Image: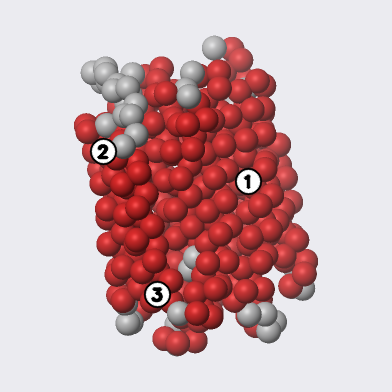
Amino acid sequence: MVRRIVAITGAIVFLDAMLFGAIIPLVPHFVERYDLTKLEAGLLLGAYGGGALVGGLPGGLLVGRIGPKRGVLAGLAVLALASLGFALAGDPVALGVARFVQGLSSATTWAGALAWVAVSVERERRGQALGTVFGLAVFGFIVGPMFGGVADLVGIRGSFASVALVAVALAAGIAAAEAPPREEARAGAVGRAFRDRVFVGGLWLNTLPALFFGTLDVLVPLLFDDAGYGALAIATVFVVAGAVEVVVNPVVGRISDRQGRLVPVRVALAASIAVAVAFAVATEPLVVAVLVVGASVTFGGFYTPGMSLVADRAERAGLAQGIGFGVTNTAWAVGALAGPALGGALAEAFGDPVPYLLCAALCGLTLVAAVRGSARMRVA
């Protein structure tokens, strides 16, 4: 039963993540074709996050109202339209609008998929199940850059139009699946959840890595491009990093189930500080490639415990899981939107090291809060 649920929800987030990651090796292509600055490239990359930010809470409310299965089907329909729009876009504004709609659709598909897992899997196995689903999403992110690299060679329009067809086919398959059980939300659940510091902390653990990866996704491809590497070479770096993260996430989820949600978080935060500082001083492409792989383990190690904390505390507050993950999508989207835009702007104005050092400082502050949070949870 659990494997079937993971397979269904994993397929959903895989497709969405693949489409999200496909643009990374195409950043230099669009920069050259439309003469974009680093800030403009960041805005194009971050448009997806903008859509997820706008759609996060409404998507969660929709899933809470109509159920995870129907929410997923609605999201896939919009995703198919957005993919077709990206394929037909002929200027950077149209590309940005298509990316925005992709992000809008993801808010509903992710809320539906993760709520599907949370309401169907017992709490003692929730972290591992969410980690496995997120690992499949990361696998989609692995395939995404390679898909983008191939699209750069064979044709962007045909490649992204094919994604629309895959979304339609996936929706047809999910329509035949059995719907998960419905939830009964308690009155005042939203207020209780947001008064819970641990719930809010789980949201932040989805914002912080999105902020860092958004910065990295703009600056690293441009650094490799300046060094003479092509789209496929850039894609390969992200493929290797994603492959490592696929393996790590279920393990992190299992540890969080057995040792507590904040144990892997503290370790990942400490390591992330070192990785972010290393990015700030690294200039050699091979060193940067190794650091990208390291970041997939350190910063990527926040997501699964963060999502598990949100699910656990939403359950405690009586908040529907769809709404909880809708809010989580919004938290992630803040980082996904701000990371590329702010990182690109800071790098343009002050140099690439500045946004990386800012991420290191945020990790340090979060580590202090996580240590204090662990003490409060032990007392409770």
User: Going by the image, does 97 lie left or right of 251?
Assistant: left
* Identity, as a three-letter code, of the amino acid under mark 1: Val
Q: Is residue 366 visible?
A: no
- Asked where in the image residue 216 lies, by quadrant, the reply is bottom right
Alpha-carbon distance for marks 3 and 1?
A: 28 Å
* Identity, as a three-letter code, of the amino acid under mark 2: Arg
The residue positioned 46% from the left and 45% from the top of the image is 11
The residue positioned 30% from the left and 63% from the top of the image is 82
- Asked where in the image residue 316 lies, by quadrant, the reply is top left
Are the residues tagged 2 and 3 within 8 Å (C-beta)?
no
Residue under pointer 2: 70
* Residue mark closest to the camera, 3 vs 1: 3
Q: Earlier in the sequence, mark 1 or mark 2?
A: 2
- Asked where in the image residue 108 lies, by quadrant, the reply is top left
Are the residues tagged 1 and 2 within 8 Å (C-beta)?
no
Secondary structure at badge 2 equals helix
Residue 158 got which mark? 3
Secondary structure at badge 1 equals helix
